[in-house]
Structures are given as C-alpha cells and as structure tokens.
Image (tube, grey):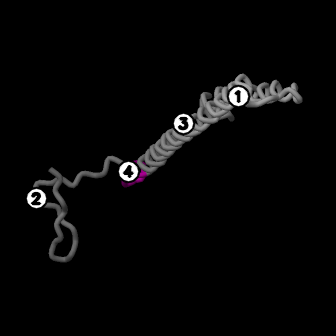
C-alpha cells in the first residue's frame, strides 16, 4: 500500500513511521520519467488519431461505393428501358439511325468509366504517397 505523507506541526510534510526516505532512483528528480511519459503520450495520441482517420476514410469509401453502384444500376436500367421501348416500337429512331447506337455507346462508356474509377480509387490501399 502506498502511504501518504502527513502534515506535521510546522506545516512540513512528514512520513509516517516505518517508511524509508530513500533517494529517488532518477537523479534528475523524475525529469527523465516525465520526458518519457510525455513522448509516449504524444506517440499514443498520434496513433489513435491515425486510427480514427483510417476508420473515417473507409466509412467514406463505403458511402461512395454505394453511390457509384446506384449510379451504374440507374444507367443499366436506362439502357434496358430504351432498348425495350425501341423493340416494342414505342420509340422510333428511323429518321435518326445514328442516335440509338450513340446513346447506348455513350451510356456503356460511362458505366465502364465509373467501374474503372471505383476499382482504381475506392478499392486501393491508403498508404501515404510520400513514402513515410
């Protein structure tokens, strides 16, 4: 058990009987301990903040992934609706024979572009680029 110093008659601190007054193992009076403690606190806090940043980074990636999946799904549904409407003669592109292939190729290009973007940026490692 740790015993606390008690206050004597003159206001000075006195130790209870039976407690040795041994000199501090650190001749600098605990300065080395405090410096080590401060360094460890800063290091631990830095690691904690990095961990929080990584968690937020992956949460943000998850949100963007869902957004891109919904966008790609919308584009695919658009292509399906246009093809069904043209196939059932609801839409007629007889005068504009270039329009339907242009729309479909453009939409397919956007789908492929978003997929490439998702793979390249959302599923990449988040290591620091400057090498540290």
Q: In the rendered view, tell whether residue 132 sits above or below residue 5.
A: above
The residue that disc 1 covers is 85
- Residue beneath label 2, please? 17
Q: Nearer the viewer, residue 111 or 105?
A: 105
Residue 27 numbered mark, or none: 4
Q: CA distance from mark 4 to mark 3?
A: 54 Å
**Residue 52 falls within the magenta-colored stretch:** no
Q: Quick one: label 3, few (<14), some, or many (20+) residues within 10 Å?
A: some
Q: Residue at x 39, y 48 (%)?
A: 33
Image side of residue 21 versus residue 65, left or right: left
User: Considering the numbered disc 4 on the image, is that residue within a helix, a strand or a loop?
Assistant: loop
Task: Identify the disc placed on residue 62.
Answer: 3
- Judged by depth in the image, the label closer to the viewer, 1 or 3, is 1
Q: Secondary structure at mark 3?
A: helix
Choose mark 2 or mark 3, whichever is in front.
3
Q: Quadrant of the C terminus?
A: top right
Quadrant housing residue 69? top right
């Amino acid at each position: 058990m740790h015993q606390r110093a008690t206050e004597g008659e003159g206001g000075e601190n006195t130790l209870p009987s039976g407690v040795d007054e041994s000199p501090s193992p650190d001749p600098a009076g605990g300065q080395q301990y405090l410096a080590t403690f401060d360094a460890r606190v800063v290091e631990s806090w830095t690691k904690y903040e990095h961990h929080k940043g990584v968690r937020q980074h992956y949460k943000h990636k998850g949100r963007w992934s869902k957004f891109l999946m919904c966008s790609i799904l919308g584009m695919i549904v658009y292509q399906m609706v246009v093809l069904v409407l043209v196939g059932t003669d609801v839409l007629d592109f007889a005068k504009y024979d270039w329009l339907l292939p242009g729309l479909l190729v453009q939409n397919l290009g956007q789908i492929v572009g978003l997929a490439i973007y998702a793979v390249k940026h959302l599923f990449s490692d988040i290591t620091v680029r400057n090498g540290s």
